Image (cartoon, helix red, strand yellow):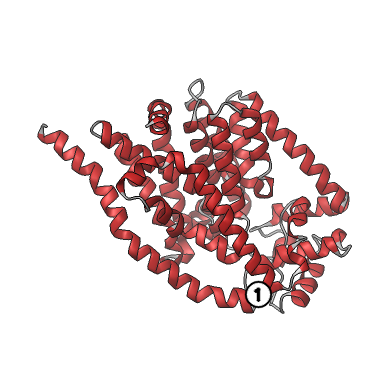
Amino acid sequence: MTPKTTADARGTRYLPDLLLGMLPILVGIQLLGWITFFPGALLHGHADFRQLYAAGYMVRTGHAGELYDIRAQQQFQDALVGSDERALPFIRPAYQALLFVPFSLLPYRSAYLAFLAVNLVLLAFAFRTLRSHMNHLMRVWRFLPVFLFLVFYPISLAIMQGQDSILLLLLLAAALAALEGGQELRAGVLVGLGLFKMQVVIPIALLFLLWRRWRLFAGFALSACLLSLVSLWVVGFAPTAAYARSLLSVGTNMPAALQFPLRVSIMANLRGLFFGLLGDRLPAFWIQVLTIVTSVLVLLWVAFAIRGKQRGAGAFVLAITASLIVSYYLFIHDLSVLLIPIVVTLDRFILAGAERPAITLDRAAGWMSATLLIAPLCIFLIPDHFYLVALPLCAFMVILIRGFPREPQALGSARHA
């Protein structure tokens, strides 16, 4: 073995060793977060689950027409969960409130614990679905993939908050499996079922439309149409229009946003990055314009950069990454789906090191995915500048595009190893 090959082999090994060495620290941070947050979420209702729980109750008790009325939400949340300074708005399609109707039959604390258990089950299914993409991580240490799921902070935060981001993680993991199995229509239906996080799934669907993957987009459109009809049936036209206005107002200076002020600087996407860097220099309107134009250009660049080569899991991994970058709003727990590109890329990096010396792009992708694994913890260190996490996320997307011609083959080798 030549000195350069030996150095490359050592470089490939450093990353798994670093991951193993960091696990105890990351586990400790997760435990501290649970100890700090869990009592308030359970006993006092200081969790996002309060809005989902109240929405389910409102639909069950005949108040679906008030689902997007912030005053009605405040009254129901205060009465059912406990008084708070302001209501957490229900900013999801109405169909999703139906999923929380069964939980509304329980007292809040019991419902919170029940949904926590459901999230853990969904996370276990997501792990099982992605297991074929973590064979080489298991060779480093049998339980390494398990701990990667447990120490990724957006996952823990989603469970603590009673959020539905774990459900989206499972749907996208299942869509990835369906896509690899040649079931593109089924994959599109699964992506469409994630429309309760439309800011993430719509860019994914648009990319596959630009890639002319008609069956996947048709499956997405089918899901979208059916869920839209269900939402209209639940609340009617006027509340649906109010929902659309509330979506556009999140994190802006529009009147509806004053009811729910949100710091855009905590969004790890292009919108958060531009507002964080230029908020004191440009009017909000021009920052919005810059965000929209840049997001469209990014989607077009991703679409045409790999056009004609977008087969296999690599295209879906890239689509998830790009969708997070261009999403209109992105909370920390929404980054849960980033775990799919992270584990797939880490596994590919270890595979590359096992079969041949890792090339520069392999090393860059491996180290950047490891960086993104711990990057969400910046919320504790630089909460007012969390938007900077968008920078490594953008770098990760660029590396995936540059290394894309090798991805389908590498991922295929990993599945059959």
Task: Give the quadrant of residue 132.
Answer: top left
Which quarter of the image is occupied by the C terminus?
top left
Query: How far from the left and from the top, in percent, is residue 8?
Result: 20, 38
Front residue of 145/273: it is: 145
Query: How far from the left and from the top, in percent, is residue 28?
Result: 38, 69
**Who's the residue at 62% across and 73% down the image?**
46
Q: Is residue 259 above or below residue 168?
A: below
Query: How far from the left and from the top, in percent, is residue 251?
Result: 63, 58
The answer to whether residue 367 is left or right of residue 34 is left
User: Can you see residue 49?
Assistant: yes
Front residue of 386/35: it is: 35
The answer to whether residue 156 is left or right of residue 79 is left
**Who's the residue at 63% across and 46% down the image?**
199
Front residue of 218/246: it is: 218
Query: Mark 1 packing: few (<14 Cα in 10 Å), some, or many (20+)?
Result: many
Query: How far from the left and from the top, in percent, is residue 412?
Result: 42, 28
Label 1 sits on residue: 45
The answer to whether residue 9 is left or right of residue 150 is left
Task: Give the quadrant of residue 410.
Answer: top left
The answer to whether residue 1 is left or right of residue 21 is left
Task: Give the quadrant of residue 163.
Answer: bottom right
> Given the image, on which type of amino acid does mark 1 rest?
Gly
**Who's the residue at 76% across and 57% down the image?**
97
**Who's the residue at 55% across and 57% down the image?**
333
Count of all numbered marks drawn on residues in the image: 1
Q: Is residue 2 above or below residue 249?
A: above
Which quarter of the image is occupied by the N terminus?
top left
Say what secondary structure mark 1 lies in: loop
User: Can you see residue 331?
Assistant: no
In the picture as drawn, the residue positioned furthest to the top comes out as 308
